[in-house]
């Protein structure tokens, strides 16, 4: 899965962009997608996978 919402578990390590347009974040596999500090619950899309 290459996208996820706040509270979901990350299935793929990588750089993710929130749909609110804020700064991209780096997540590792099994991390939980965080809330955006400004917008709360958002959806993230994978920009670039990492190991
Ligand atoms: Zn935001």
Image (spheres, grey):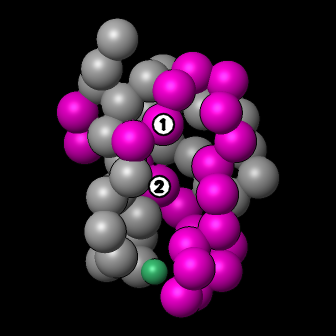
Q: Residue, x 57% and y 79% (percent of image)?
A: 37
Tag 1 near tag 2, CB within 8 Å: yes
For residue 44, the mark is 2
Rendering coords of residue 2 (x, y %): 44, 33
Residue at the spot of label 1: 27
* Drawn side of residue 45 relative to residue 35, left or right: left
Is residue 8 in sight in this rendering? yes
Q: Residue, x 39% and y 42% (percent of image)?
A: 26
Q: Is label 1 or label 2 in front?
A: 1
Rendering coords of residue 33 (x, y %): 63, 49
Gap between marks 1 and 2, in whole Å? Answer: 11 Å
Is residue 21 rendered magenta in the image?
A: no
Q: Residues within 10 Å of mark 1 (few under 14, many from 20)?
A: many
Numbered disc 1: secondary structure: strand
- Would you identify the image quadrant in which residue 39 lies? bottom right
* Drawn side of residue 44 relative to residue 11, left or right: left
How many numbered marks have been drawn onto this rendered protein structure? Answer: 2
User: Vertical placement of 46 versus 34: above or below?
Assistant: above
Rendering coords of residue 19 (x, y %): 40, 70
* Drawn side of residue 30 relative to residue 22, left or right: right
Q: Residues within 10 Å of mark 2 (few under 14, many from 20)?
A: many
Answer yes or no: disc 1 within 8 Å of ligand 1. Answer: no
- The residue at the far left in this view is 48
User: Vertical placement of 7 versus 13: above or below?
Assistant: below
Rendering coords of residue 8 (x, y %): 73, 44
What stretch of residues is rendered in magenta?
26-48
């Amino acid at each position: 899965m290459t996208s996820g919402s706040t509270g979901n578990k990350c299935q793929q390590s990588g750089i993710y962009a929130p749909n609110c347009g804020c700064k991209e974040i780096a997540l590792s596999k099994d991390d939980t997608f965080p809330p955006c500090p400004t917008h709360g619950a958002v959806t993230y899309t994978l920009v670039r996978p990492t190991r």
